[in-house]
Amino acid sequence: MIAVEKFKAMAMEGSAKSIDFLISCLDKNTDLPTTKRLDYALSFVTSQEGIGQLEHYLFNGTQIQRNYITLFFARRNEWPLVNRAYAMKLIDYRQAYSR
């Protein structure tokens, strides 16, 4: 189990490599506590490189990855990205617009 402090530090680093690591932790076998820690940590991504990498995964990641990244962009009110992912059927209505 990876500590929330490690996830947070990687998110704050915000490099493409650190984002790749964080997102790789989101798979079909990820337990609920880990998803909660990752979701929390993602809120600390502020670098342009990190946000760009998250945008890449919004359109190219697995379903679980796209769902958590949608939450990230929705919290930031980045609706054009969320709307585009929804229009492309990469996320469902509930995931895109539920708060």
Image: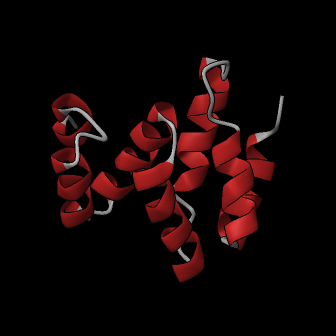
Image position of 76 with respect to 49: above or below: above
> On the rendered image, what quadrant is the C terminus found in?
top left
> On the rendered image, what quadrant is the N terminus found in?
top right
To which quarter of the image does residue 73 belong? Answer: bottom left
Q: Residue visible at 20% across and 45% down?
A: 86
Question: What's the image's color scheme?
Answer: secondary structure
Image position of 17 with respect to 8: above or below: below
Image spot of residue 65 (x, y percent): 51, 40
Front residue of this view, candidates 44 and 56: 56
Image position of 67 with respect to 69: above or below: above
Q: Is residue 63 left or right of residue 45?
A: left
Image spot of residue 76 (x, y percent): 32, 62
Q: Is residue 80 left or right of residue 22?
A: left
Front residue of this view, candidates 34 and 91: 91
| Count of number-bearing discs | 0
Image spot of residue 30 (x, y percent): 66, 23
To which quarter of the image does residue 95 belong? Answer: top left
Q: Residue visible at 69% across and 49% down?
A: 22
Image spot of residue 13 (x, y percent): 72, 71
Image position of 51 with respect to 2: above or below: below
Q: Residue visible at 26% across and 62% down?
A: 81
Q: Is residue 12 left or right of residue 89?
A: right
